[in-house]
Image (cartoon, grey):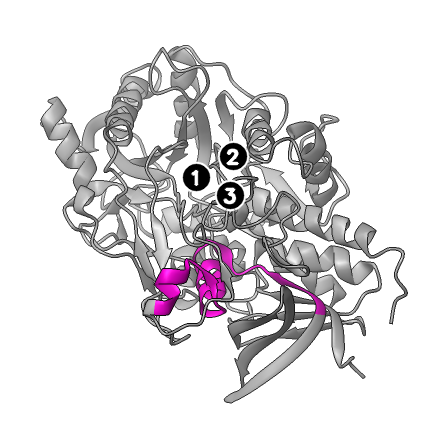
């Protein structure tokens, strides 16, 4: 029999929500998890090679408003709508982030909240089970993390060419330092996706103090006199309400600010224009949206890659590598990664470069198709963009998608960084040993060389990494939405726990950091409530 009032309601079973639930449920408290998406049983979720299909089938379907800095393109804004959230449809690349990025978070919070690298790195160790042997890594946690061990020969050539440009080989970019070139680490178990739901939530589903409701869409949080009284949501065609002592929103950097605004929490003027009575005037809700700009390049090669150009034999070889070793492009198309500096005057790496030994070509509509000849693909991201955007309500109707405004390349520094990033890729691909394996540059192409031509190519081809953060940022200033302990300012028992609280980007993929945030808040809430009787 479930309680009338839960200890905790978690809105969103994504990366942070699952890690948070893991801590709370194991403490013996009663927990209700509400997830708008359905189950994660699709084979396209389990098999990493199905990533693109999974994203098509389990996405919220959001698009940003036309971006004037990219010739008015409407960027698709992929967000996971399924158990596990985006961890069930993402590329599974596992990156903690460098120590200085978390120290910057700590500075944004005035040193409060426990966000320094010294304080949060033990949480990463606790959540992971890594095949890296050094003492800074975790080896008994619920999330399985594996490193590429049997890369394609052309990936090894890429590694050596990055070294040839002056960077060292880095055995573990999640250890002492990020800088250099490495083999990628993935959140995978035996070559299959290990999502946040797989790692943290599913092992607890049989417990009596946990209830998971799928296909349950939150419409609003009831907030009365600074207390979150309940969650209103739609389930099986009817309007439902559940109450809890503490309510924690884990809906992500797009849907968390949307839910707050629908609940009357946000910029009072904007809310009134939609006919929503303001409960809390927090102008920072929806602001500070940031994502990593990225661009794809491709090269034709003189040697076979994983691109299946030899028909059945190549496909059988790829299948055998997965069956025997759980590696190769079925487990992931990317094998090499580097954290580099876009220019010599940079104090630390500001580019994240991915290398794929399978030749995907990006079409003008943003889709990908396999090359018909041997090829490789490289993707490079600007880790610290200067520009930012905003999430707004389109209306007061919960079913309407939010407005996403983001001029990705409006700031000249961001445009220049992406141009420099292409130059960085070209220097690597023009360095031995990979130089002798390259037949030609497909994109941008050798004909594109001047500054103006490169800028135009960047404007036409830059996308986001789907690493959205910052729209309910934590901090101490008046524009901060949550305090350093992640409680919504002006409330007693409403919390936010997802990428929206991150004040600034980290150098790398966001999934590991989201799980760390979830586990961290869970541990702190358990401690906070330790002196209270359980139900």
Would residue 7 be found to the left or right of residue 272 on screen? right
> Label 2: which residue?
184
> Label 3: which residue?
510
Residue 416 horizontal/vertical position (percent): 24, 26
Looking at the rendered structure, the secondary structure element under dot 3 is: loop
Q: Which residues are magenta?
A: 245-272
Would residue 455 be found to the left or right of residue 533 on screen? left
**In this orientation, which residue lies closer to the viewer: 83 or 444?**
83
Q: Which quadrant is home to the N terminus?
A: bottom right
At horizontal 44% and vertical 26% (from top left) the residue drawn is 338
> Label 1: which residue?
334
Measured Cα–Cα span from mark 1 to mark 3: 17 Å
Would residue 496 be found to the left or right of residue 91 on screen? right
Q: Which quadrant is home to the C terminus?
A: bottom right
Report whether residue 179 is seen: yes
Report whether residue 326 is seen: no
Disc 3 vs disc 2: which is toward the camera?
3
**In this orientation, which residue lies closer to the viewer: 425 or 481?**
481
Residue 214 belongs to the span the image colors magenta: no
Looking at the rendered structure, the secondary structure element under dot 2 is: loop
At horizontal 57% and vertical 59% (from top left) the residue drawn is 250
Measured Cα–Cα span from mark 2 to mark 1: 7 Å
Q: Earlier in the sequence, mark 1 or mark 3?
A: 1
């Amino acid at each position: 029999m479930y309680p009338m009032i839960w200890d905790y309601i978690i809105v969103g079973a994504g990366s942070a929500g699952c890690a948070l639930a893991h801590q709370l449920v194991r403490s013996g408290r009663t927990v209700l998890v509400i997830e708008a998406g359905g189950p994660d049983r699709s084979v396209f979720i389990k098999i990493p090679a199905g990533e693109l299909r999974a994203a098509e089938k389990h996405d919220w379907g959001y698009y940003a408003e036309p971006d004037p800095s990219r010739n008015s393109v409407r960027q698709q804004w992929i967000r996971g709508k399924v158990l596990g959230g985006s961890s069930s449809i993402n590329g599974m690349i596992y990156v903690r982030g460098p120590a200085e990025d978390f120290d910057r978070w700590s500075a944004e919070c005035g040193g409060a909240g426990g966000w320094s690298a010294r304080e949060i790195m033990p949480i990463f160790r606790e959540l992971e089970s890594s095949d890296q042997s050094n003492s800074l890594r975790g080896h008994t946690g619920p999330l399985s993390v594996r490193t590429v061990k049997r890369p394609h020969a052309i990936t090894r050539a890429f590694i050596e060419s990055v070294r040839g440009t002056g960077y060292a080989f880095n055995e573990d970019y999640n250890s002492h330092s990020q800088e250099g070139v490495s083999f990628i680490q993935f959140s995978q178990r035996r070559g299959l996706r290990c999502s946040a739901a797989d790692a943290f939530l599913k092992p607890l589903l049989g417990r009596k103090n946990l209830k998971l409701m799928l296909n349950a869409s939150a419409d609003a949080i009831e907030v009365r006199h600074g207390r979150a009284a309940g969650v209103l949501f739609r389930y099986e065609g009817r309007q439902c309400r559940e109450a809890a002592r503490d309510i924690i929103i884990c809906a992500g950097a797009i849907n968390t600010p949307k839910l707050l605004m629908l609940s009357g929490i946000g910029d009072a003027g904007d809310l009134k224009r939609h006919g929503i009575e303001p409960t809390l005037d927090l102008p920072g809700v929806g602001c500070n949206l940031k994502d990593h700009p990225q661009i794809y390049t491709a090269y034709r090669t003189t040697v076979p890659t994983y691109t299946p150009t030899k028909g059945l034999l190549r496909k059988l070889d790829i299948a055998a590598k997965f069956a025997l070793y759980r590696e190769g492009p079925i487990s992931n198309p990317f094998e090499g990664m580097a954290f580099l500096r876009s220019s010599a005057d940079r104090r630390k790496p500001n580019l994240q470069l991915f290398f794929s030994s399978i030749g995907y070509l990006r079409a003008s509509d943003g889709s990908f198709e396999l090359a018909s000849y041997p090829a490789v693909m490289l993707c490079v991201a600007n880790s610290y963009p200067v520009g930012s955007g905003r999430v707004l309500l389109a209306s007061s109707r919960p079913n309407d998608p939010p407005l996403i405004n983001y001029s990705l390349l409006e700031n000249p520094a961001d445009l220049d960084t992406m141009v420099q990033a292409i130059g960085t890729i070209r220097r690597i691909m023009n360095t031995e040993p990979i130089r002798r394996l390259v037949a030609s540059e497909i994109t941008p192409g050798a004909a594109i060389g001047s500054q103006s031509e490169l800028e135009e190519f960047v404007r036409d081809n830059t996308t986001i990494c789907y690493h959205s953060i910052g729209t309910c940022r934590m901090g101490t200033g008046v524009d901060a939405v949550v305090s350093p302990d992640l409680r919504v300012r002006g409330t007693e028992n409403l919390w936010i726990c997802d990428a929206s609280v991150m004040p600034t980007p980290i150098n790398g993929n966001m999934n590991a950091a989201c799980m760390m945030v979830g586990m961290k808040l869970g541990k702190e809430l358990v401690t906070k409530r330790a002196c209270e009787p359980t139900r």
